[in-house]
Image (tube, rainbow, N blue to C red):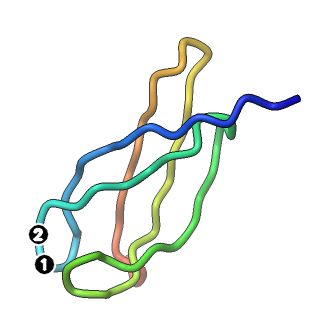
Amino acid sequence: MSHFSLESVHNYCPYCGEPIELLIDCSVHAQEYVEDCQVCCRPMVITAEVDNEGDVSVRIRSDDE
């Protein structure tokens, strides 16, 4: 049985600069996916890593970067 847990991470859109909230699945230790900005709807590439202590590190970049 896997432990599914989400962590809320606050960051900023690389396009419009508005604050956004991301929900990161902490049961996956390394992931990269595309999500549209909640404000300007442009695609952002989200890279998230969860270390052995459960701390989440997130990098957001524009889709054309």
- Give the image location of residue 11, x and y in percent: 23, 52
Q: Gap between marks 2 and 1, in whole Å?
A: 4 Å
Seen from the viewer's position, the closer of residues 6 and 17 is 6
Write down the quadrant of residue 51 in the picture: top right
Who's the residue at 42% across and 36% down the image? Answer: 57
The residue beneath circle 2 is 17
On screen, residue 4 versus residue 47, left or right, reads right
On screen, residue 47 versus residue 38, left or right, reads right
Q: Residues within 10 Å of mark 2 (few under 14, many from 20)?
A: few
Quadrant of the image for the N terminus?
Answer: top right
Who's the residue at 62% across and 15% down the image? Answer: 52
Q: Which mark is residue 36?
A: none
* Amino acid type of the residue that numbered disc 1 sits on in the rendered structure: Cys
- Give the image location of residue 14, x and y in percent: 22, 70
Who's the residue at 68% across and 40% down the image? Answer: 28
Write down the quadrant of residue 32 in the picture: bottom right
Q: Is residue 58 above or below residue 45?
A: above
Helix, strand or loop for disc 1 = loop
On screen, residue 5 versus residue 20, left or right, reads right
- Give the image location of residue 31, x and y in percent: 63, 51
On screen, residue 10 versus residue 56, left or right, reads left
Who's the residue at 46% across and 60% down the image? Answer: 46
Q: Residues within 10 Å of mark 1 (few under 14, many from 20)?
A: few
The residue beneath circle 1 is 16
* Amino acid type of the residue that numbered disc 2 sits on in the rendered structure: Gly
Q: Is residue 61 above or below residue 43?
A: above
- Give the image location of residue 5, x and y in percent: 59, 34
Is label 2 in contact with label 1 (beta carbons under 8 Å)?
Answer: yes
Helix, strand or loop for disc 2 = loop
Quadrant of the image for the C terminus?
Answer: bottom left
